[in-house]
Image (cartoon, helix red, strand yellow):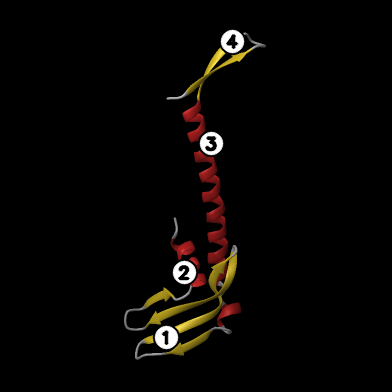
Amino acid sequence: MPTVEVMDLAENHKYIVDIAQQDLTEEKDTLEGHKQEKAAIKDSLLANLQATGEYNRDWTVKKYGKNAYTISGQGLGWADGKLTSGTWDFRTDTEQLMPMDKEGLALFYLIKSP
């Protein structure tokens, strides 16, 4: 394990600093900060999605098969840290909802991430 010997001239005392542990602690703190930021964005996003009334009246729903629909519009995608337009596929027979474009996919991954 890499270590550095540090001399505190004021105290006339040597300290051994574990560089690897310090780096891991800093990396953990950075990752924890990113996790908290992502959780805050996700909470905000979910709150916005619960209030879809402001968006859903502008969504376009098109049937393209016996049990298949595309749903597109504002609030169904994610880009540049905010809700954007997106397109999703909905299957009534399986009740599956899947993103159909990169914005929808980005929103899907944001919602599903831990």
Residue that label 1 marks = 69
CA gap, disc 4 to disc 3?
A: 25 Å
Q: Callout 2: helix, strand or loop?
A: helix
Occupied quadrant, residue 83: bottom right
- Quarter holding the C terminus is bottom left
CB within 8 Å, label 4 to label 3: no
Name the residue located 55 percent from the left edge and 65 percent from the top edge: 45
Marked residue nearer the N-terminal end (3 or 1): 3
Question: Where 66 falls versus 49 (above or below)?
Answer: below
Q: Amino acid at mark 4?
A: His
CA gap, disc 2 to disc 3?
A: 31 Å
Q: Callout 4: helix, strand or loop?
A: strand
CB within 8 Å, label 2 to label 4: no
CA gap, disc 3 to disc 1?
A: 48 Å
Residue 26, which numbered label?
A: 3
Q: Residues within 10 Å of mark 1 (few under 14, many from 20)?
A: some
Name the residue located 54 percent from the left edge and 49 percent from the top edge: 34
Q: Callout 3: helix, strand or loop?
A: helix
Apparent side of residue 52 relative to residue 1 in the rendered image (left or right): right
Marked residue nearer the N-terminal end (2 or 3): 3
- Quarter holding the N terminus is top left
- Residue 100: percent from the left, percent from the top? 45, 76
- Residue 11: percent from the left, percent from the top? 64, 10
Residue that label 4 marks = 13
